[in-house]
Image (cartoon, grey):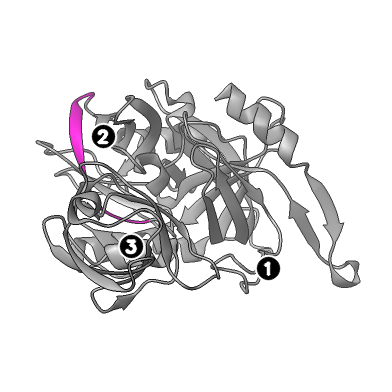
Amino acid sequence: MDDQWRYMRDEVRPQHIDGPGGGGRILTLLVVAILAATTFIGFRAELPQWAPFAHSEIVAAPYSTRPAPTLDTPAVTATVRPALVHISTSSRPFGAGAAGSGIVLTAEGQVLTSHHVVKGADTVTVTDVGNGEVYQATVLGYDSGADIALLELTGAAELPVATIGNSGDVRMRDEVIAIGNAGGLGGDPTAIPGVVTDLDATIVALNAADLTRKALSGMFEIAAPVTSGQSGGALADRRGTVIGVITAASGDPAQKSADDANGYAVPIDRAMRVVRQIQSGTPTETVHVGPTATLGVIASNAQPAGTGARVEAAIYGMPAHAAGVLEGEIIIALDDRAVTSTQSLHAALNMYRPDQTVGVLVTGPHGERRIPVELTVGPPN
């Protein structure tokens, strides 16, 4: 983690820029995902044109003039803490893992967390804070673009459940608490108080582990020094209701003080829309439901842009290799779904389940050919 932090510090410098007419402020900053073993960085600014939210606007949220009761940190923490879990993951072949947090939604063990906490994980182990029990977890589904995932704990029953609030009621300068598995160390979740400083923040995050970028829009920004391991944890209001899912932090926690640190959270209304879609059992191009299906290829965007996903490697022993897909061929469709990039390839695979057979249309030195490939189970994208 320290090596990743040093790399990020060398690459991006925070700076302030006056907006048009001097009336606005655009802040370029380092954004890091709150994983013990995975780092995000990014820019809080207008997004480049390749980003999926390139034309999103940062809306200036009005300040509320109504007085609000002071948040009682110990009372809120005592209310929320029992309904949280610690999450640890591991991935083959080297057993690399990460740590994060989660929010218990049902007494039978459905848990809300951040997608990047379980991304690429072969095994997910969950420790419930309320009862101290350890469970194996299954990923029921996820929306990688919204950075939300839903887990199910094996053998869970009668778990303490979080009270879900309404993120539409959140106002600027509201006092909140970020609660989660700080440092990925387990034990009692750490509670960090702060105030809401933006209701519609837009960030672009770079995952230092795999160098993938992710644009996140409509985020809550909190003036609070959230830290590694708190991803997937709860952003709670003064009543102890969950109003957001902690996702990212700005800058390097080793260098930033509590006065200039910011955290980011997915509003709970948005997170619960993803949860309900997963619970419905119906996948979409953005929401994957059930075990992840994989072709077993490493792909990049074909050139010129928009012409498909180029196969850099068909992994030995995996479906595409066994079916005869060749390195250098370009995937242009799965059945009747066009593939124009690696992103659209992932979106098309969202609609399939392991053991299904898909017609992979490729083009290359051997011309255009359609290859039937039986998909297998892979880790969450």
| Magenta segment | 132-143
Q: Position of residue 350 (x, y in %)?
A: 28, 63
Q: Quadrant of residue 84?
A: top left
Is residue 334 visible in the rendered image? The answer is: yes
Please name the residue shown 43% across and 69% down the image: 308
Q: Is residue 308 left or right of residue 126?
A: right
Task: Characterize the local packing of mark 3: few (<14), some (14-19) or many (20 or more) Cα atoms within 10 angstroms.
Answer: many
Q: Secondary structure at mark 3?
A: helix
User: For the stretch drawn in magenta, what is the main secondary structure?
Assistant: strand
Identity, as a three-letter code, of the amino acid under mark 3 = Val
Residue on which disc 2 sits = 124
Residue occupied by mark 1: 62
Location of residue 298 in the rendering, given as x and y in whole percent from the top left corner: 38, 49
Q: Nearer the viewer, mark 2 or mark 1?
A: 2
Q: Residue at x 31, y 63 (%)?
A: 287
Residue 59 as seen in the image, left or right of residue 78:
right
Identify whether 334 is placed above or below 79: below
Between residue 357 and residue 320, name the one nearer to us: 320
Task: For marks 2 and 3, give the CA distance.
Answer: 20 Å
Q: What residue would you read off at disc 3?
A: 274
Is residue 282 within the magenta segment? no
The answer to whether residue 361 is above or below residue 297 is: below
How packed mark 1 is, by other alpha carbons closer than 10 Å (few <14, some 14-19, many 20 or more), is: few
Which amino acid lies under the numbered mark 2 shown in the image of this protein? Answer: Val
Q: Do callouts 1 and 3 mark residues in contact (Cβ within 8 Å)?
A: no
- Label 2: state its secondary structure: strand
* Distance CA(mark 2)–CA(mark 1): 41 Å
- Most foreground residue, 107 or 313: 313
